[in-house]
Amino acid sequence: MMMKLKIFAMVGLLCALMLSASVTMAEVKSPRAPKWPDPAVRDLITHNRGNIATTVENYGYVAGFKYAGMASGRWPANSDHDYLAEMKFWIGALDDTDGVYVDDTDDDFNPLPSFISGTESYNIRLSTDSTRFDYDPTDTIGAGHGNAAKGWRVWDAQLNDWVYERRYSVIDSTFHNSGPLGLQESICRYGDDGSGQVNMGLIVTQTVRQWDYDYNKDMIFINMQITNTSARNYHDLAIGVYSDFDIGGNDPISGDNGRLGDMVSYDTTLGMAWSSGVGTQCPQRTYGNRISLHSRQRRHDFPAQHSMGAYASGRSRTV
């Protein structure tokens, strides 16, 4: 199916990851990715609402800073069990002539700036840090339908502008302007000119949301709004999540990081793949020994709808 691409993808991380601090990217350099954006435009925060803690960067890189003492897919949040070495995103498609195009975190994604308090900034917007967005305590829009906005906005790719979030009310069956939907929420945008020139011509708006209620404190959701800004049409689009898991976290006796004993399996009927820690080489099983990815994808003409996934860790559960 040919399409002028605009895709929404949601990836949920139900494993056991969460925290909220920022660092200067010139001070922290991970050895993982082969190509990094300029340190002057990189930014990093740590999500920490609920029972999960993990770092998030502003160009599609999640976790990866355990070596620097930062949470990397940590669950429980107050433990030293980091389940995720790193997580990245891949996007691939064919053009009208069936030419193959691929975008990925390592080689292509590059942060895009926005204006915060009138100044160009590459900082990730974080709803729990008023210095990271245009905070306005007098902005009470949404107070009657959830959280007051207090200056919080989300990016609308169709309007090409920052707008209020929209929250659905079951009382009047209507969407209303609102503040953050999550109890902790972050937003960044990145393009695909990391190699020095535009590749597929895609722009990604990445929104991460967390809650800390009993029924969802072990979850973190990543929503990717992907817009095609090129003159090409793409078809047979595929979105991949590259995840390097270390199931079980650190073993204080052997010093292993959790990778030993990691196994992979899948179920095509459920549309689910999972990685689990088994045997004597996964000693921290009491902290959870299974992380799974559940994916549902649908392709549509522009504008497209959603593709969803979820990671789960700990005791087996329905996702």
Image (tube, rainbow, N blue to C red):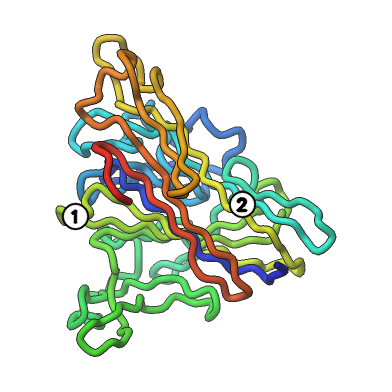
> If you read the primary sequence from the N terminus, does the residue marked by circle 2 or circle 1 appear first?
2
Q: Is residue 242 above or below residue 128?
A: above
Residue 254 on image: x %, y %: 30, 9
Is 141 in front, or is 170? 170
Is 317 in front, or is 72? 317
User: Quick one: SS at disc 1?
Assistant: loop
- Residue named by callout 1: 215
Residue 51 on image: x %, y %: 21, 44
Give the amino acid at mark 1: Tyr
- Residue named by callout 2: 91
Residue 263 on image: x %, y %: 43, 26
Please indicate, yes or no, whether residue 179 appears anywhere in the rendered image.
yes
Is 93 in front, or is 265? 265
Task: Please give the name of the residue rendered at 56% of the width and 66% of the height, measured from the top-left corner.
Answer: 7
Please indicate, yes or no, whether residue 224 appears anywhere in the rendered image.
no
- In which quarter of the view is residue 181 placed? bottom left
- In which quarter of the view is residue 210 placed? bottom left
202 left or right, relative to 101: left
Q: CA distance from mark 2 to mark 1?
A: 31 Å
Q: Is residue 283 above or below residue 43?
A: above
Give the amino acid at mark 2: Ile
Q: Residue furthest top?
A: 254
**Disc 1 packing (10 Å; few <14; some 14–19; many ≥20):** few
Q: Are marks 2 and 1 in contact (CB under 8 Å)?
A: no
Label number found at residue 144: none
58 left or right, relative to 141: right
**Disc 2 packing (10 Å; few <14; some 14–19; many ≥20):** some
Q: Residue furthest bottom?
A: 172
User: Quick one: SS at disc 2?
Assistant: strand
